[in-house]
Amino acid sequence: MNVDRVNRWLTLGANIGVVLGLIILIIEVRQNASLTRVALETAKNDQLANIELSIASPAVAAAWTKSIRAPETMTDADVRMVESHLVAIMLQWDNLFQMEAGGLASRARTQSHIQNSAQYYFGSAYAKNWWRLQKDGWNDTPMIEVAGPVIEAVDPNFLLNYLDSSRVGAPSAVSQKPVE
């Protein structure tokens, strides 16, 4: 009888240990998911910072500005420089879609980021034309579903107006006519 009682207590202790182990495991998995989310968000932000720093370099800044003010005068090298930055921002967005697929970001978070950044990259006639040439490659992906309508809704004169309104004082004399 004593052995039976000891066995029951040992079984109860083992079951409590298993439950505690599962609780600890759940906490650890959640912490790991949080750490992964933070690491991926940091990588996304680093990528955006690298894009912006690259656009600030003199040659790329000249090509980027030309794509906004006078896209018809762009050289092949200018086109390639600007295109590389549009590809980079789309890869950053795709990273968010991958985070979403892995349960580390919500659709609302992804859509909000795209909504907030699209106009600063696709707010020119050149960028919108580039998107029209590229979008078929994204068929049947979240990029078309989420980013496609956002990019389509962006004003093609946003960056032109943004550059002009960023100046303190008189409007820029080099501004071209808005795209119809």
Image (cartoon, helix red, strand yellow):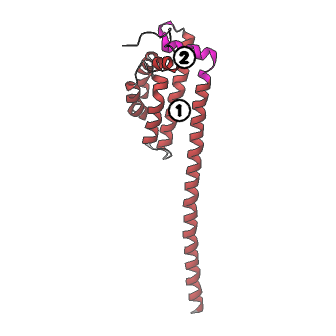
Q: Nearer the viewer, residue 91 or 180?
A: 180
Report the predominant secondary structure element of the magenta stretch: helix
What's drawn in magenta, residue-wise?
54-73
Q: Which residue is at a point 39% across and 13% down the rendered structure image?
A: 179
- Residue at which label 1 appears: 92
Residue 97 at x, y = what percent? 47, 38
Question: What amino acid is labelled 2 in the image?
Answer: Trp
Figure quadrant of the N terminus: bottom right
Q: Is residue 114 left or right of residue 61?
A: left
Question: What amino acid is labelled 1 in the image?
Answer: Gln
Q: Is residue 127 left or right of residue 24?
A: left
> Residue 5 falls in which quadrant of the image?
bottom right
> Residue 150 falls in which quadrant of the image?
top left
Q: Residues within 10 Å of mark 2 (few under 14, many from 20)?
A: many
Instruction: State the CA–CA distance, disc 1 to disc 2.
Output: 19 Å
- Residue at which label 2 appears: 64
Q: Which residue is at a point 62% across and 14% down the rendered structure image?
A: 59
- Closest to the camera, between mark 1 and mark 2, is 2
Pointer 1 or 2: first along the chain: 2
Figure quadrant of the C terminus: top left
Q: Is residue 139 left or right of residue 20?
A: left
Is residue 80 covered in magenta? Answer: no
